[in-house]
Amino acid sequence: MKELFNKGMEEISNNQKDKALKSKPKSVLEAFEYIVELAENSNLSDEFFNLAGKHIRYAARKIMLTPMQTVLLALFVDRSEDRSIRLSEIANYVGCRTTRILRISKEIDVLEDKHYLIACRCQKVLGYRVPSEVLAAIKEDKPYVYEGAVVDSLQSFFDHFDEQMSSKKDSELTHDKLLNITLDALESIKDTVFAKTLTRYHLGDEDLLLFIFMAHLFVEDCDDNIGFHDIEDIYDNDKVPYLCKCMLRTRSCNLFSHNLIENVNEDGMARSDTFKLTDFAKNELLGELNLTTNASSRRDLLKHESFAEKKLIYNQKEDEMISQLLSIISEDRFKEVQHRLENAGMRKGFCCLFYGAPGTGKTETVYQLARLTGRDIMRVDVDKIKSCWVGESEKNIKSIFDRYRNICRSSPLAPILLFNEADAVLGVRMECAAKAVDKMENSIQNIILQEMESLEGIMIATTNLTSNLDKAFERRFLYKVRYEKPTTPARAQIWKAMLPALSDSDAQQLAAETDLSGGEIENIVRKHSVAAILSGNETIDLATLRKLCKTERLTPVRTRIGF
């Protein structure tokens, strides 16, 4: 049976190849299709080039490439859905060794230089992808002509550099290539004050790139706290060269001598591991940008106006604490409170903990506080902080607080720093941690504790679990709001708020029968609304609501009986 199947597949393949030999190409894509068909197990031999000659010549003439470049591009286009096409895959398909493909790698380099292919050297593994612009040109039977960004002003220079940094982070640019592209772009704006001033300092290429990178962070993100974890982005393998690190630490780097960068000062002490542009550099070199508070530094924040108004119903104790917190973080009151705390020698920041059962409105409370006070939210996804790479998690958490600090300095109204579902970083620290994972957890927690001490804004952490909360964290949270399951009267209000057509007596009845949270009640109401849309029956059916209540939890909902 297997032999018959293989024979049948071989016959189909032979028929396709016969069709490819007889057909006359009508488009580049059709020619590519026939080239790929004939290239299978061909070893890219002379016989293959003879058989596929008319298709290769047709495509080569249309897209203005050599025959070998045309064949290689056809093979890559055939795998264009893959973002990392290996040379070994091409070699396996054409039935030759990878060394044979490497022998003609100069042709692949030409395709890369002409931007038909983009190389990705992630984790030291070479792969290629075909840009969507190339595919669009091929579909139109046209050669692809790369149109680089027009760099004719300082702003366009930094926009261009930002795009290159995105490619660098995707491992599609090496350090050397980034350097060459940046120097070419700098030459394009040689008449700007920025370029003329840098030329006057006779900086080396590496110092130029380092300064441009730091200036880019300031222009894009108002970043005045640049650490080695930021600088490593411009180097291959995310490793700052030892000599560069040493010169920055000892201030022997030329950028210091020309008063272009300085150490960040914290509590009167200069930090040897963090840097920023000097006021001179900002005014003299970047003055033509007319920089004000840069909106891009707030681009990833959740905007306060994006939160829909939502009535939240609390138990009495929670309601009192949330009302008090809302009053304190309002713009005028918050400044007054901070001023008085500072005069008394106390910490100015407000760190709050919302804890309790799931679905009780902890995260939604933060959203409504933001909406009512006009504060945006910088949301931290704890699961994205942690990395399998040694030291990377610590860098991630440090960069979060650095960015929050920069946004607070450049904004008239400090946003809320939200650690949502923060159970994973607020637990009890390990004593005498031996495992790498435990050491990482402890390091992350120590960084958060230190940052909470110096925080000048508003931080809110939400968590479902508090039994393992580290005592050091407990002390640093000024406001701790415990969210209890809603009482029966509160549940009745929630039912009425979400289903206004529900009668008071039915709302009271549903509230008395089950101990659902606000989030669970919202789920039930949503399911009821969907069912009403599907059936066309808008009538509120108490029996259906009761049924939905029973199926809301994976474990049965506790039903109250009697008094």
Image: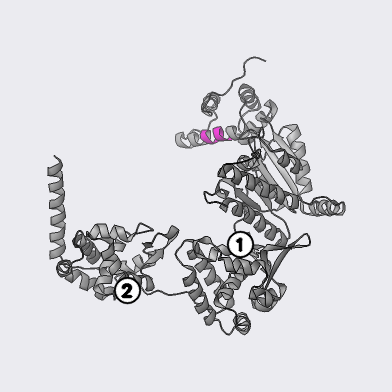
Give the left or right position of residue 76, taking residue 340 as reference: left
Magenta-drawn stretch contains 431 = no
Image position, residue 286 (x, y; %) = 65, 76
- Measured in 3D between alpha carbons, the distance from the residue under mark 2 to the one under mark 1, in whole angstroms, is 43 Å
Q: Callout 2, which amino acid?
A: Pro
Q: Residue 228 shows which numbered tag?
A: 1
Q: Position of residue 272 (x, y in %)?
A: 69, 63
Numbered disc 2: secondary structure = loop
Query: Which range of residues does the magenta coloring cover?
Result: 522-527
Quarter residue 73 falls in: bottom left
The N terminus lies in quadrant: top left
Height in image: 416 above or below 474?
below
Residue at screen point 19% across, 68% down: 25
Q: Residues within 10 Å of mark 1 (few under 14, many from 20)?
A: some
In the displayed structure image, the side of residue 118 where residue 229 appears, left or right: right
- In the rendered view, tell whether residue 379 sits above or below residue 260: above
| Residue at disc 1, secondary structure | helix
